[in-house]
Image: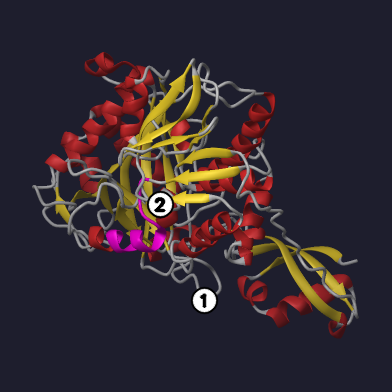
Amino acid sequence: MPTNLQLILTPEQAAKKELLEKKAAEKLGVEFKRINHIRITRKSIDARTRPVRVNLALEVYLDKQMPMQATIEMPLQDVSNKQRVLVVGAGPAGLFAALKLIELGLKPVLIERGKDVRQRKLDIAQLNRNNGMNTESNYCFGEGGAGTFSDGKLYTRSKKKGNVQRIFEIFYYYGADERILYEAHPHIGSDRLPLVVENMRNDILKFGGEVHFDTKLTGLIIENERIKGCETADGRKIFADALILATGHSTHEVYEMLHEQDVELETKGFAMGVRVEHKQQLIDSIQYKSKDRGKYLPAATYSLVEQVDGRGVYSFCMCPGGHIVPAGTDDEGIVVNGMSASHRNSPYANSGIVVEIRPEDIPADFDKYGALKGLRFQQYVENLAYINNGGKGLVAPAQRLLDFVEGRLSVDLPECSYLPGVISSPLHFWLPDLIGSRLREGFKMFDRKMRGYLTNDALILGVESRSSSPIRIPRDAETMQHIRIKGLFPTGEGSGYSGGITSSAIDGGNAAIKVMEYLQEN
């Protein structure tokens, strides 16, 4: 049996195998040569101390003890001739639902409006060149969902909904780096996640599931308030007695379709704001209290939250060593998001800075849209960004950070990671006041926590509007089914009940279990 050990080390000691083994031997009071193997089970960085320290939890194997292999199994079975279940959307909720259905002996029929991940890369490359928007294949739509090209962050606070570690193990099984099993804030990286997603799809097909790309949901087939299947844009009808709706928070047409079919929806709180970009070296110096982080520390991150006029203002999807990307889904809105590759080696650090918006905050002009009023307000703000980009396609309206806070137009702009380009724009003027005024105060408060954060060398881009869904599809807490329509299982971010890759993956797996229970009872 291994010996469990906790160590607090310098970054260099934690990074170098020989130094790590020597410190472990010293702590255990044994000779260095007795260390046979060390496995890291938990790793975190403590930047509160000076110098910075790395906290490690270890399993240490002495003498001839052999390390136990971390056995991760996927208990999948052939479901080629089993009962069919429709899964709409190939994001984390849909993929994990499909895998869980196979494990439970049910056949997933997975449909996705976008393309497979390899073809999707080509359309994203055109986006980054400002060569137009493919409304069916972009940073939001396509195999893997919005998270595929947005860093693959796996950290979640939703630990009561299911086994978070099991989600990490499944990602590792399909090709993610082993570090996601022990790092405090794991991420896969936008360069590695596409392969992981492809491997998942290959197993779904291998074990008898179906995957249909370029297949857009246009309607539900409902009889006597029970799901019987769905209709697609190419005129097909696909029949099944259960449907997992995992379409993500950006499928506006799905919300429109549900509204037209009298499927209950409700407005929920969400958030909107901007994406801010600093030089990574500045963030490193603030967080690590050093001009140079050195070769053994990763690009520094931050997490900020304040209350301004009774609403939260907070950082979202912070991307150290990352890039800002165009994340819209239509031709008349500008949306930005952030991503990082696995090595996080870009010279820029970016983060969404968003303002909490509650249903009662939305201007009364939007009340006429009923449950869709949050969606309409979101679209309105995205269109404002489009109007203020000078008619230059995906070029984003931008402003120096201090200029935004002090209410003046930026006469020029610093270099930026956003490939389609930026144009100087008075975001302080055209952003709705319920967002802009709170952002300005929030940035001032952030600077008190991170001295130097509020600088004119930083840039804000508009708008960050897709951090969460403005709509919830109400479902029964016990069965996960829609509150009225039997056999309809709203799941993942688009349902309004989860947020982020990990919590959506958990939600998808839980939905699959509830589908099995429903089919057994019916």
Q: Which residues are magenta?
A: 113-124
**Helix, strand or loop for the magenta stretch, by majority:** helix
Mark positioned earlier in the residue sequence (1 or 2): 1
118 in magenta: yes
What residue does disc 2 label? Answer: 451
498 or 455, nearer to the observer = 498
Q: Amino acid at mark 2?
A: Arg
Quarter residue 62 falls in: bottom right
Residue 400 appearing in the image:
yes
Image position of 275 (left or right of 1): left
Question: Around disc 1, counting alpha carbons within 10 Å, would you say few (fewer than 14), some (14 to 19), or many (20 or more)?
Answer: few
Residue 389 at x, y percent in the picture? 13, 47
The label nearer to you, 1 versus 2, is 1
Q: Please identify the quadrant where the C terminus is shown.
A: top right
Relative to 252, is 100 on the left or the right? right
Residue to which mark 1 is pinned: 295
Q: Residue furthest bottom?
A: 33
Whether residue 10 sits left or right of residue 261 in the image: it is: right
Instruction: Check the image and report above or below for 71 versus 162.
Output: below
Farthest-out residue, left: 390
Query: From what the image shows, is residue 13 above or below residue 443?
Result: below
Residue 15 vs residue 117, the one in the foreground = 117
Q: Residue at x 90, y 80 (%)?
A: 63
How far apart are the alpha carbons under marks 1 and 2? 24 Å
Badge 1 amino acid: Lys
Q: Residue 52: x, y in percent?
A: 59, 64
Q: Does dot 1 land on a helix, a strand or a loop?
A: loop
